[in-house]
Amino acid sequence: MNRFFLQVYGCQMNQYEAGVVRAVLAQAGFEETELEQDADVLLMLTCAVRSHAEQRALGRLGAFRRLAGRGQGKTANGEWRMANGERRTANFPRKVVGVLGCMSQNLKQALADGRTADIVVGPDQYRRLPELIEKARSDCATVVALEQNDECYSDILPVAHGAPCGSVTVMRGCDNFCTYCIVPYVRGRERSKETVQVLDEIRELVRKGVRDVTLLGQNVFAYRTEKDDFSSLLEQVSRVDGVERIRFLSPHPKDLTDRVLLAIARTPKVCPALHLPVQSGSNRILEMMKRGYTREEYLARVVRARELMPELGLTTDVMVGFPSETEEDFQDTLELVRTVRFDFAYMFRFSVRPGTAAAGFAPKVSEADSSRRLTRLIETQNRITRERNSGMVGRSFEALVESESARGRAMLARTASNKAIVVSGGAAIGETVACRVTGIKGWTPVAEVTGTMSNDELRITNDGLRTARCVRRSSHVE
């Protein structure tokens, strides 16, 4: 009765917290299975950032219920109504169905009142999973655990997969309350792990073969303890033996100070890559979104970042169809995208999130206009992505081989600036290789391996990057 199946939706934070769930259950004697039909406990870790993610999870929840042999769920007297119409008492051996994460927090009433799941568990209650599963097996009502208690899971080492790349959550929650965003409501307020706990977790990842570490948080630039901020955290992580590359997700543009930029540029192991969500190019829309910066301030930060790091890889998030967005507002967004020339962008239509301020904003943008604008935006950014990637042809790069590619014997690797490339020539997962880009397929660079890089060569390369990045320095930030 202790085999579980876990389906994970959403961001890298959810992928990381899936490791927390696995660690909690493993400690209680549960064993994970990759086959749903073999599981005694069917769990999904969900996302609530956009309605599409919720709809996907709800569809899968229906499949879980059918696999568990249930139709309409529990009857008033505690019996289970099976898919074939049969009724059984609550104590017969049965599969437990659970919904975890942000969607649980967001749709708590519907999930609990509708008895669509046996356990409904929020992001701060994963420690209680073994207890909640056992209670669900014996009770007749859905077990709900949604209390928010500033949990950071600092003493839990997540079950990690996927070396040579790994991630560590350094902070959770958000205090920004952007008007369209559900995160502060389902994740709670900002809180940070102690630096020593972050470093211990990274050392454990290194022991498991991880060489590329991503620091995670809803707003990593807001990381703060009594002694450290994000800049000093980067410096300390870079001193961990065995770590070759450091990345981070996700930052907020309003918190990208010169101090943070200089820390990124001066710390050799920190990759020159920045995911900086802009959301809109219209100052009017940015103010309605409560983003805390103007178009001009965003562009100035981009200029400064590229001054310090000429090889910077820059990606973003862009939203269209925000309430009251006019054609002029959309043109401002298109112009910003053309001006900045992002390497890649995640682009999407505005999604109403009940409970957020923007849910009540008017007038709404029609679905036809939102779709047309999104199509135009995607076409523009895709053309820029192809052009920027085409500029890599004929150049040589250092790349870490991460996984096998779908393209025959080739491998998928990633440059320091976060460009995914397909490499051929005998590279193995976990190797850092020198490679030369020979062409573009679609918009993906294709490269040939020209040699592997030793630890000494990597150190020299990183030292050189630090020198090159810091040619220009601010006179007022040290």
Image (cartoon, helix red, strand yellow):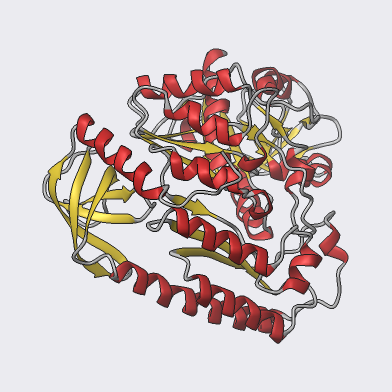
Where's residue 86, x and y in %? 68, 38
Quadrant assignment for the N terminus: top right
Q: Nearer the viewer, residue 258 or 80?
A: 258
Q: Is residue 316 left or right of residue 268?
A: right
Where's residue 36, x and y in %? 49, 37
Where's residue 202, x and y in %? 46, 24
Where's residue 452, x and y in %? 15, 40
Q: Nearer the viewer, residue 407 or 444?
A: 444
Q: Is residue 46 left or right of residue 38?
A: right
The image quarter in which residue 162 lies:
top left
**What residue occupies the far front of the structure in this picture?**
475
The image quarter in which residue 363 lies:
bottom right
Q: Residue at x 45, y 45 (%)?
A: 265
Q: Residue at x 68, y 18 (%)?
A: 134
Q: Residue at x 43, y 40 (%)?
A: 270
Q: Is residue 388 above or below residue 311?
A: below
Residue 248 seen by the camera: no
Q: Is residue 462 left or right of residue 453?
A: right
The image quarter in which residue 429 lies:
top left
